[in-house]
Amino acid sequence: MRHGRALLLGLAAMLLAATAQAGELRRVTLDSAVLGRPWEVGVYLPSAHATSGLRYPMLFLLPGDGVTAPEMPDLGIEPAANALIAAGKMPPAVIVMPEIGRSWGVNAKEPMQTALAEELFPEATRRWRGLEGRRGQVVGGISAGGYAALRLALLHPDRFAAAVLLSPAIYMPQPPEGSGARRAGAFGLPLVPETWTALNYPALLPGFRARGLPMPIFAASGTTDHLGIAAQVEMLRDTWKAEGMPVELVLVPGGHTTAVWRALMPKALTYAFRHTDPPRP
């Protein structure tokens, strides 16, 4: 009996210690001069961030169409990051997840693309002691955020070491009828096909090639995604291989759902921080 009680107390102590060391996803409101309004941002900070004085690798992870900060914990970032860090499968890192509304990360309804590139990325790096340079930062996104993240990776390959895309809404040649892209207003209402084509990632490939920088990509989807995104990420894989770029494709059972993104999160985070430097002074 005493042995069993001691074992239970020991397990409880270990659990409390692990909890005390766990990082936390919190909500922060930034005052955006570019957007001219408050900007809600989710930020995961590793446990020692407040006291270590170190600079940390960063992932900028853009959420889907209309996802708000209160919904971000549902994506499983905090438990995935805590488990991976505890297991030594990713370094302590900062993950920044800004609301992008229904902008799809482009400068249409409001200057979201400009706000991300010129305001959020440098401000978050300063505020949360992120590592600067290509080996310090990764960009990623989910659904509409994946569309935006791929554009940012191609537009700013000097900033990011890699891109991680979960169910990215990168439809070729045009979004399906059920896509939020047709209702968001970022590409016109009704959607203007020429606008979509001009802003989608293939239009950015010539400029990206001219930079001569690598961009490893992790692209993933549920196999039964009703928007056909599994086929779209396979197309992206083939395009990226033809460009001579590293790409990892992951398909899991499921649709265009939070459950799929939670399941993919550990793989996405592992891939992201495989391409960054560890924390340093």
Image: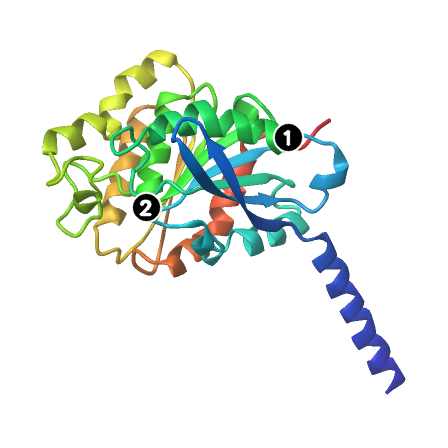
| Circles 2 and 1: CB atoms closer than 8 Å | no
Locate residue 43 relative to residue 240 in the image: left or right. Answer: right
Image point (21%, 43%), residue name: 181
Find residue 247 and report its image quarter.
Answer: top left
In this view, the residue in front, 281 or 221, is 281
Q: Which residue is mark 2?
A: 143
Amino acid on which the number 1 mark rests in the picture: Arg
Residue at 38% x, 31% y is 35
Question: Is disc 1 surrounded by few (<14), some (14 to 19) or many (20+) residues within 10 Å?
Answer: some
Q: Position of residue 80 (x, y in %)?
A: 55, 53
Is residue 9 placed above or below 202 in the rendered structure?
A: below
Q: Is residue 173 left or right of residue 91?
A: left
**Which secondary structure, mark 2?**
loop
In this view of the protein, can residue 247 be seen by the observer? yes
- Residue at label 1? 129
Label 2 to label 1: alpha-carbon separation: 28 Å
What kind of residue is marked 2?
Ser
Look at discs 2 and 1 and give the one toward the viewer.
1
